[in-house]
Amino acid sequence: MTDPATIAPEVTDLDALRAAAKDCTGCELHECAGPAVVGAGSAGAWLMLVGEQPGDQEDKAGEPFVGPAGKLLDRALEQAGIERDTVYVTNAVKHFRFEQRGKRRIHKTPAVGHIRACRPWLDAELRIVDPPVVGVLGGVAGKALLGPKFKITEHRGEVLEWEGRVLVPTVHPSSVLRGEPERREEAFDALVADLKVVAAQRR
Ligand code: URA
């Protein structure tokens, strides 16, 4: 048993965090998904990007944002002038929540209970990485960090003061992939524009 509420506040570096979180039993998602997928990047990164949860490919690879949404994020970061290897990339929820349909595992949005159960890991990542800038990717990350009423659509691209850090919310990269094909380019450009706001916060 690994209860994040008791273990996460004690971990002092990312290796210890990764080792402890791997066996997390803080909610029922560990029963079906692979080992918890924690963030990738280094302590001291200037920027932490917080997504929703690992997808099918991330669950298999054990790394965040390596699937289609991750590839789109890489392109958007590059166009915004942000090198991914300077960034710590993580998720609000560390296990993949899905529904099995035949051979396919279909993404299911994590519930408030999953976000809450996982929050100690995110807090530990914030404490250890200590990024001056946080980029919030989508509604689940927004709710995890800013509360259940937070709406990304009302605040995307804004520069907010949050717990001694600068925080910029934007949409989740998979929303660009899910949108109508004829509006995809526009949605991608809007994501890049928000990420340029993030880039401008680098000191
Ligand atoms: N979507 C996320 O929010 N995170 C990932 O790691 C992959 C897809």
Image: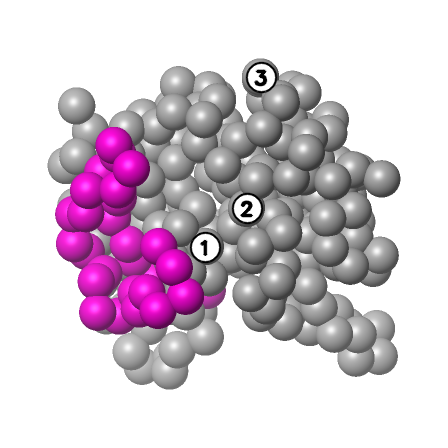
- Across and down, in percent, residue 20 comes to 73, 29
**Figure quadrant of the C terminus:** top left
* Picture disc at residue 144: 1
Residue at 25% x, 32% y: name it.
Answer: 164
Q: What residue type is labelled 1?
A: Ala
- Across and down, in percent, residue 84 comes to 40, 34
Q: The residue tagged with tag 1: helix, strand or loop? A: helix
Q: Name the residue under label 2.
A: 119
Residue at 16% x, 47% y: name it.
Answer: 159
**Residue 66 seen in this snapshot:** no
Which tag, 2 or 1, sits closer to the chain's start?
Answer: 2
In the image, residue 52 above or below residue 43: below
- Across and down, in percent, residue 46 comes to 31, 26
The magenta segment = 146-174
Magenta span contains residue 150: yes
Which tag, 1 or 3, sits closer to the chain's start?
Answer: 3
Q: Mark 3 points at which residue?
A: 12
Horizontally, residue 143 falls left or right of residue 68, namely left
Q: Residues within 10 Å of mark 1 (few under 14, many from 20)?
A: many
Furthest residue in direction front, as rendered: 6
How many badges with numbers are in the image? 3
Which tag, 2 or 3, sits closer to the chain's start?
Answer: 3
Q: Distance between the residues labelled 1 and 3?
A: 22 Å
User: CB atoms at circles 1 and 3 under 8 Å apart?
Assistant: no
* Picture disc at residue 59: none
User: CB atoms at circles 2 and 1 under 8 Å apart?
Assistant: yes
Whether disc 3's CB lies below 8 Å from ligand 1 is answered no
Q: How crowded is mark 3: few (under 14 residues within 10 Å), some or many (20 or more)?
A: few
